[in-house]
Image (cartoon, helix red, strand yellow):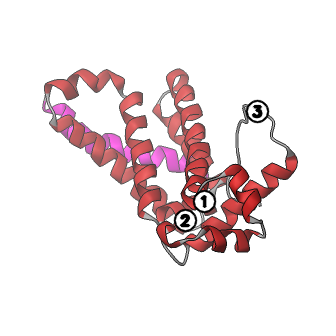
Amino acid sequence: MAEYVKRRQKPVKEDARVTKTKERLRESLLDLMEDKPLADISITALCASAHVNRNTFYAHYGSPADVLDELMADLGSAVAHSLAVTRRHGSVAWLTELCENVQENQHAYEMLFATSDGRTYIEREILSAYKLVMDSTAERIRRNPRHADAFAFAAGGSMALLERWVSEGAQGSPEDMACLINRLCKTGMSGIFDED
């Protein structure tokens, strides 16, 4: 079902059957991850859950981890698109795009938040985005490593807010959530940056 990961852009048009098969595999993997860690999910179990034969699976992936990697790459491409928006319109625009992506792919994010691999991915994406968005502070970080703590704080706080938002059904507008995250992060980070 496309409800799990909605792709914003596809560089190459994929055959509709391949797209449907991959969506079933992703959906099944996320469903299986509700009950067990990724490392414990076998190809056999994944194929049975998705109603896909092993040969079809191997035509696209080598392991269940590859399915998750592709899912994360698609979510990451949406984050990259958001960063391009940020360059033109600021951090609230980036956060709004991120929140829209989270809301559109709510189930995928629920499952990612529930796994250590997924949490690491989300945190890494948010942290790297903050560093790019706030590139004017890059020199400050080189001069004072404590500023890296501010970015870790912003990423962790953003992640906690997004996780709570998703767990409550991602109700409300992405713009409102983006403004809340931005306001709280700026308030928290200002203490460190004001010391300079």
Left or right of 30 on screen, residue 189:
left
- Majority secondary structure in the magenta region: helix
| Residue type at tag 3 | Val
Where is residue 92 drawn, in percent x and y?
A: 49, 36
| Residue type at tag 1 | Ala
Q: Residues within 10 Å of mark 3 (few under 14, many from 20)?
A: few
Foreground: disc 3 or disc 1: 3
Real-space Cα distance between discs 2 and 1? 5 Å
Q: Are marks 2 and 1 in contact (CB under 8 Å)?
A: yes
Residue that carries the numbered disc 1 in the rendered image: 108
Residue 12 circle label: 3
63 relative to 138, above or below: below
The residue sitting at the right extreme is 16
Foreground: disc 2 or disc 3: 3
Where is residue 156 drawn, in percent x and y?
A: 34, 52
Image quadrant holding the C terminus, namely top left
SS label for mark 2: helix
Image quadrant holding the N terminus, namely bottom right
SS label for mark 1: helix
Asked whether 193 falls inside the magenta stretch, the response is yes
Left or right of 47 on screen, residue 162:
left
Real-space Cα distance between discs 2 and 3? 27 Å
Q: Which residues are magenta?
A: 172-195
